[in-house]
Amino acid sequence: MLASRRAEARRSILVQVSSERSFPELAKYCAQFGTIASSHHYRVGASGDDETDYHYIVVEFSEPEAADAAIRSAVFNEEKPGVRARSIFLWFRAGPRPKLAVKEAKGKDEKKAKLNSVEGSRIVGDGELKELLMSAESIEDQIRILHGATCLNDLGKRLRFLAVRQVESSLQGMFPQALAYPFGSSVNGYGKMGCDLDLILDLDSEAGAKQNPDSRLVFHTKATNPNERTQVQRQLESIGDVLQLFLPGVNSVRRILKARVPIIKYHHEHLDLEIDLTMNNMTGVYMSELLYLFGQIDDRVQPLTFCVRKWAQAVGLTNYAPGYWITNFSLTMLVMYFLQQLKEPILPPINKLVQNAAPTDLRITDSQINCSFLRDITRLDFRSTNRSSLEELLVQFFEFYSHFDFNQRAISLNVGSSILKPDHSPMYIVNPLETTLNVSKNVNLEETELFRIQVRNALWLLDTHEKPTATEGTATEWGLISLFGNKVKDRITPQMFFTKRLVNVKDIFDDESMAPNGELALDYKNKMVRHQVASIQKATRQEINKLAAGTTTTTGNNNGNSSGIKLKRNAKRR
């Protein structure tokens, strides 16, 4: 998948236009360089106004030479001088066609070019998504619709690989083997529209390759800092300067070099994309390969994961900012483990992938972490017989984790079963590649308890909000809408469920709590509670009267008089 997307980016250019109506003229102009394979339009801006938003078209040629010819034909803007850096990011100006050094391609396709997508990067709003889910026939259909409407589409992937190509081409003059590896949600199959792009930069992707022992010519190199972390920080600082000063479209460069993993964050205005760039951490790339592989084994994996993530976001389990709550990565691990431990498993244990690995699947990181596992699922010795629907799997997911013992057990996707917790973390999920680490180390006890509460609440909502019949109307929320629509302004915490007593026992026998007619003067919102308290008071009053009568008789016999002891009818309890 990565190789095919890189090839697409190699054959593509990005052109800013006045609107999608400029495409016929642009297509006619670009056809002289070669055959156009596909074209995709999108806009940047939230106003929806053609005059204020910026419009772009991704033009993919059939051959990379055609894209190179288009770039060579481009000129610089003399009216607005800037850093004269050549790149794949262009804009289409009005006016006569300038004289070109490239001859028109012979035998070009005379068919009228068409846009493959218009406003292809538009994110579906909550209101529109709700209408789509309400029109579904079942919860199974709702999950499929949710996945199709929110997952990262083809254009979103194309734009991200254009950003990858820009970073690589800016450095390959000095580092010919430099490669930028996308990882995370952009490539693992679980990314949604608008997600960030995570990149790992390797300045020498062939560092581990075998060299010619007979060569007598050796490159002179610059001495590196003995402290690897300091070396990475200095390199990232210089790369950040290159991004900020020379690359078109790049702005808001932030260098976060003191973090545990040094990183550069920046925004690309032409792609409308937030990008995080780091170095020398290939474990993230291999983890993305593993998650992508799981999604290819069964077509129910990705839709179910999208549904669980959306639910967690709606009820406040996840948050965009880092903290003590569950991350999307931890949620994905929970879904994968659930699919492994079913009576008829849908996913195999990771150890099965390791056992089926071929010599070409060998991957060892610079930190000596073994990331070798099967990459070709056609050779996987595993076939699932589970035919459960997505609706059944969603309910089973909530049921499973409503009873899971997070106090004593840890989750291991490597063996496909739970193990004893190695430490006292409230939630422990073994990192599939770095097995000594806990994926959910950041999650505290409060968030773990909140997860338990919310999965039980989700079961209740699904059970009580079934699809209405034709006679009941279509306005009633049901299925996933009942899960996602149950939003609260403030985060629900377990402490909210440990409230004070509804009634103070002292108040039941207090003089001030009684009305003149002997009834309770307290105001109760719940009538059932009021009746129960009245019954308790009546029974207690009768017991007091019996005790008073018995005490009077006993005292009269002992003292020789019948006056007895008169008890206060509503004596306060001390």
Image (cartoon, grey):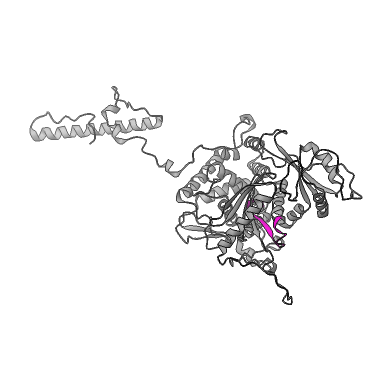
Residue 110: quarter of image: top right
Is 172 part of what is drawn in magenta?
yes
Q: Residue lying at the far left in this picture: please name it.
A: 560
Evaluate whether residue 479 shows in this view.
no
Tell me where residue 548 appears, x and y as whole percent. Answer: 19, 32
For image coordinates 70% across by 36% down, the residue present is: 53
Evaluate whether residue 431 shows in this view.
yes
**Left or right: 46 as drawn, with respect to 555:** right
Tell me where residue 131 appears, x and y as whole percent. Answer: 65, 35
Residue 180: quarter of image: bottom right
For image coordinates 79% across by 36% down, the residue present is: 21
Is 144 part of what is drawn in magenta?
no
Q: Nearer the viewer, residue 566 or 282?
A: 282
For image coordinates 26% across by 28% down, the residue present is: 511
Tell me where residue 489 appears, x and y as whole percent. Answer: 51, 37
**Left or right: 157 as drawn, with respect to 253:** right
**Quadrant of the drawing holding the N terminus:** bottom right
**Left or right: 426 as drawn, with respect to 191:** left
Tell me where residue 149 appears, x and y as whole percent. Answer: 67, 42
Q: Which residues are magenta?
A: 170-186
